[in-house]
């Protein structure tokens, strides 16, 4: 259920990138404005994610998740029928406000049932993001070509509504009970907060830059058709789902969360640099595939790191606070890098700048968490099922 919820939400968000060439022409959008569509989703999510995390810890995951998915479907109806770009953007923003309530309840459900292998099972849940993107890349282009982008959005609306109705299955979901003062605000030491925040900001922003602009990039100089570009995006998303499982499983070994995340950043930076250099089609397919594996695959291990630090009973709140950084990167980086591509009339500076940012984020995370007690416990589950948070 948690995986399906993320897949349905991501199907809609990635759909904006998949349909970007059609939206650009029909609504008269620039490249930067196409990137801003994704930012609008995450502006809304930033506003609601912390509140949704608190509500999840107090009211339970089922009502928060069901309402959020239903509201996202209703918001996308406005976008599908919008006659102009401003109304379309309003629908996208409202969808973002709803999407902010999807991640915290799904994190709480997974930690409550499957905390002993937290990194792996959170990665299974988070694989809903690339799975949703994979489906969007494969399903939406044929619908858009045959019937138009508005009918393609109807498919996303139907999926959101179906999963919203299924949220009732989580009514009796197990959750971890708080201990001591766990019901209060989550406090991270400033250095750790900076490291995890910068990393989540940059990795999320770069991931969504890659997903938002890939079809535009491939239908430009590389000469891909929309349908073939959609297949390439779907391939990257599918490998990203596998990557999340792989990195989550590897990170569950004691002391490996941080090295795994830093390694993901290093490899992602190299691959983005290769995209910036210009590649022929055979090599381009390989680099896109590997970029999906690492750049789309980072998220589960990261959420496990946050859950380790938060401890039982506070995972919803901690997830909500971490998501502010994650959504913030998704708000800021896609349009800024889109402006860079517009101003230079090339995607090479976009990919090159993204590579530098990812490399810097990996160094920041390593410097912030290296040598702390977190390294001794990250990835090691306690007998109660979740790692104990280190003393601040």
Image: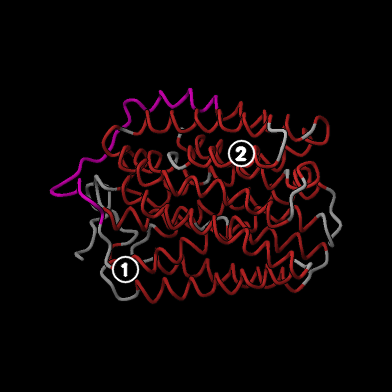
Front position in the image: 114 or 76: 76
Q: Is residue 25 magenta?
A: no
Q: How many marks?
A: 2
Helix, strand or loop at mark 2: helix
Return the residue at label 1.
Answer: 375
Q: Position of residue 240 (x, y in %)?
A: 59, 53
- Identify the image's colour scheme: rainbow, by chain, secondary structure or one colour: secondary structure
| Placement of 45 over or under 310, stated as above or below | above
Image quarter of residue 114: top left
| Placement of 372 over or under 288, stated as above or below | below
Q: Position of residue 188 (x, y in %)?
A: 28, 62
Q: Is residue 184 magenta?
A: yes
Question: CA separation, marks 2 and 1?
Answer: 36 Å
Q: Give the residue displayed 49% in from the left and 40% down from the top.
A: 99
| Placement of 120 over or under 361, stated as above or below | above
Q: Which residues are magenta?
A: 161-186
Return the residue at label 2.
Answer: 12
Q: Give the residue displayed 28% in from the left and 72% down from the top.
A: 372
Helix, strand or loop at mark 1: helix
Q: Is residue 365 left or right of residue 29?
A: left
Q: Position of residue 276 (x, y in %)?
A: 72, 71
For label 1, the crowd category at 10 Å Cα-Cα, with few meaning under 14, some 14 to 19 and many 20 or more, is: some
Q: Is residue 133 left or right of residue 328?
A: right
């Amino acid at each position: 259920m948690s995986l399906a919820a993320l897949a349905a939400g991501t199907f809609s968000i990635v759909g904006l990138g998949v349909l970007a060439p059609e939206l650009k022409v029909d609504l008269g959008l620039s490249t930067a404005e196409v990137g801003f569509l994704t930012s609008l989703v995450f502006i809304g999510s930033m506003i609601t994610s912390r509140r949704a995390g608190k509500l999840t810890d107090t009211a339970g995951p089922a009502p928060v998740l069901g309402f959020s998915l239903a509201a996202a479907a209703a918001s996308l109806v406005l976008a599908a029928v919008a006659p102009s770009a401003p109304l379309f953007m309003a629908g996208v923003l409202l969808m973002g406000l709803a999407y902010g309530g999807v991640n915290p309840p799904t994190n709480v459900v997974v930690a409550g049932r499957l905390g002993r292998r937290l990194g792996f099972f959170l990665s299974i849940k988070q694989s809903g993001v690339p799975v949703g993107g994979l489906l969007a890349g494969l399903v939406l282009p044929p619908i858009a070509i045959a019937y138009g982008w508005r009918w393609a959005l109807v498919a996303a609306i139907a999926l959101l509504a179906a999963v919203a109705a299924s949220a009732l299955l989580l009514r009796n979901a197990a959750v971890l009970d708080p201990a001591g003062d766990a019901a209060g605000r989550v406090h991270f030491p400033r250095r750790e907060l900076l490291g995890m925040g910068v990393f989540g900001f940059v990795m999320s922003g770069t991931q969504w830059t890659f997903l938002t602009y890939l079809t535009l990039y491939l239908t430009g100089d590389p000469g891909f058709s929309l349908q073939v570009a959609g297949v390439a995006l779907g391939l990257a998303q599918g490998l990203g789902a596998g990557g999340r499982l792989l990195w989550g499983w590897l990170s569950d070994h004691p002391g490996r969360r941080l090295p795994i995340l830093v390694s993901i950043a290093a490899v992602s930076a190299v691959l983005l640099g290769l995209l910036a250099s210009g590649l022929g089609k055979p090599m381009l397919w390989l680099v896109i595939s590997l970029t999906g594996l690492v750049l789309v695959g980072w998220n589960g291990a990261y959420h496990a790191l946050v859950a380790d630090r938060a401890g039982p009973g506070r995972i919803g709140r901690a997830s909500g606070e971490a998501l502010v950084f994650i959504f913030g990167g998704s708000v800021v980086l896609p349009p800024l890098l889109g402006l860079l591509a517009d101003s230079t009339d090339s995607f090479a500076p976009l990919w090159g700048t993204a590579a530098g940012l990812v490399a810097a984020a990996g160094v920041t995370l390593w410097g912030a968490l290296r040598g702390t007690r977190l390294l001794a416990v990250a990835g090691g589950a306690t007998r109660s099922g979740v790692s104990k948070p280190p003393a601040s």
